[in-house]
Image (spheres, rainbow, N blue to C red):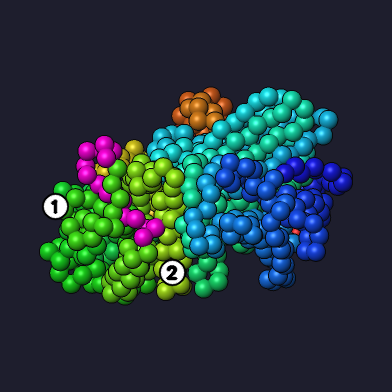
Amino acid sequence: MKWLALGVALVMVSMANAEAPTAAERADASLFVQSTLGSPGGPAPAPPVSFLYGGKPFRDVAAGWAFSHEVDRHSDHRVRHTLTWRDPETKLTVRCEAVEYTDAPTVEWTVWLSNEGAADTPIIEDLLALDTAFQRGKEGEFLLHHNVGSLTTRDDFSPLETALPAGAEGHYGGEGGRPTSRDMSYFNLDWGGKGVILAFGWPGQWTANFRRDASTGCRVTAGQEKVHLRLHPGEKVRTPLIAVQTWQGDWIHAQNVWRQWMRAENLPTIHGAAPKPILLAASSRMYAEMINANEDNQKMMIDRYAEEGIALDYWWMDAGWYPNANGWPDTGTWEVDRKRFPNGLRAVSDHARAKHVKTLLWFEPERVAPGTWLAENRPQWLLEAPGVGANGNRLLNLGNPEARQWLTDHVDALLAAEGIGLYRQDFNMEPLAYWRAADVEDRQGIAENRHVVGLLAYWDELRKRHPDMLIDTCASGGRRVDLECLRRAAPLWRSDYAYEPVGHQGQTYGLSAWVPFSGTGTAGKDAGYYGEGNGPVDSYTFWSNVAPSTVLNFDLRPRDKDFGDLRERVALWRSVADDYSGDFIPLMPFSKAEDQWIAWQFNRPEAGRGFVQAFRRPASAYGMAELRLRGLEPGARYEVRSVDPAAAPTEVRGADLMEKGLAVAIGERPGCAVIVYRKVKG
């Protein structure tokens, strides 16, 4: 399939309303939808999906199949398209379920393949959910904006730019079966003043390829990495979710239109509303996660935050609350350790609730360690991978309906019985080898496909049973933040690379372009992953680490220590946290160098306010920067001041802040500045 970006003149984006989708972008999106999906009553379009069926390209054989196109205007801004191809001979049905967003330049689709016949289908292979070519004009060249995944290094989520000149190729994908371990599954293909954002939803092993031809085209393909299978009668498989957003202007504008769409249509809601900023606290650094935790010390830590006047939203209880003879990795017995918690975790939850705090609880249900309840009692539900790892872990097969039903009912009952308000799911293993070991020659990819469908169904059912409960997606940090996961869960611990300031500055810079709600943790200066640690609560470390969801990992046991600095900084974070929901604007080029600055802006034009964060690294020789803000009203006047409420404000025209810039001075090395602004006139 080829989409020609023709027919719509480039419209320059007004800086006063820089990040709203334009009429021209929506018109471009309509052209893309028409060329991709066609229209009811019209001829069958070239399918957006491609694969080989019995050795022949589906797009060739589909011409002889029955075709239908149904449209349902689901709401005032969503149009649902269902395109169906049916093979009269083998009874394979290919159903493309697409949603066109009329208030955003965005369309998405998922394709299901089902065998409605009485015999196995021919081989289905090379299944691609996206296979299209984009054409640029005669001027300019293709540039791909993309990001590193979550590697547990200082590079996590770093933004990248890859040039795609004639003949170039770019290959990206998951690693080990976790989708955002190596590469993020989000891309912005820019060809100078126009482009497309492409995102893939697949919590498994996906692959994407960008191939430039010798002229002005770039072919993009994406799908599950390995599919070579027959479908048995009554079986079905699905492709990854594909989302496409067309844009004009500049790529930063495009990213913020994407952020708006993510907030409006994708983030998991609580009683119909997007999640608000969350403040949590944990004792994981003091008690080796929950290995050394018990009812008394958990209650004590909750009390200490209350005594220090730090109002929490959640108390975070991480790995190790269950029986674990060999440490927290002994997962597979999902019962509360009654030796340490004789009254269950309910006693902690009730104690926290009395102080207006909910509780979060960690699970890792897919990894099953030897000797645990699941390993001993339900081995038929587990997948093995001979030769993988020395610890004997197995994978709970969520593609098995019986296993998934047991897990759903068991976890649901445990959450209710223990009074848990937030379900946290981790995944500290690579499942790909287990899936592939389970497949036979003519069924390659089926175990992964079933597991992915089962995982999403599990989360959907948990959310149905607990509509006021948020799910946290964690996989050794941020290795499961693809689009399908983010529709159901939020990454509240975005990386296992924790606390170090420069790395976390880079995480905020890179991830914020794609994900409007994420979380991490903060602790004292020079804090390690574990250890009591009573380092100072310095501004540089604190502001480098905070995010829309922030978990405090401070040792509050000493009652003779003054925690006034922590209390003050938490209050300042609270004062700006709502503005994380606005547009994200990088104000300096990305860098991890110790002799550089980095800065960005969160802007909420509808509220007339926002804030700027700037960081001077330890070896930076210069102490001042001019930062040109974005998205303000040129004729309006803004009150600008340090986030410190005692700081004296100044009043500045929006045009001056955008054209001349905001002068920021930072005397300390390292040091930071947090500057807030609000519209006061105009």
Classify mark 1: residues with Cα within 10 Å, few (<14), some (14-19) or many (20+): few
Taking depth in this image into account, of 395 and 581 the one nearest to the observer is: 395
Taking depth in this image into account, of 612 and 49 the one nearest to the observer is: 49
Identify which residue is drawn at 42% across, 60% down. Answer: 454
Classify mark 2: residues with Cα within 10 Å, few (<14), some (14-19) or many (20+): some
Q: Is residue 89 visible?
A: yes
Identify which residue is drawn at 21% across, 55% down. Answer: 375
Residue 620, percent from left and from top: 52, 26
Q: What residue is disc 2 on?
A: 461
Report the span colored magenta.
386-400
Residue 325, numbered label: 1
Q: Quadrant of the N terminus?
A: top right
Q: Is residue 566 visible?
A: no
Residue 134, percent from left and from top: 73, 39
Mark 2 and mark 1: Cα distance apart in space: 32 Å
Residue 3, percent from left and from top: 76, 44
Q: Is residue 418 above or below residue 637?
A: below
| Residue 307 appears left or right of 544 | left
Residue type at the position of mark 1:
Ala
Q: Is residue 250 above or below residue 325?
A: above
Taking depth in this image into account, of 414 and 256 the one nearest to the observer is: 414
Say which label, 2 or 1, has the lower sequence index: 1
Is residue 392 found inside the magenta-colored segment of the image? yes
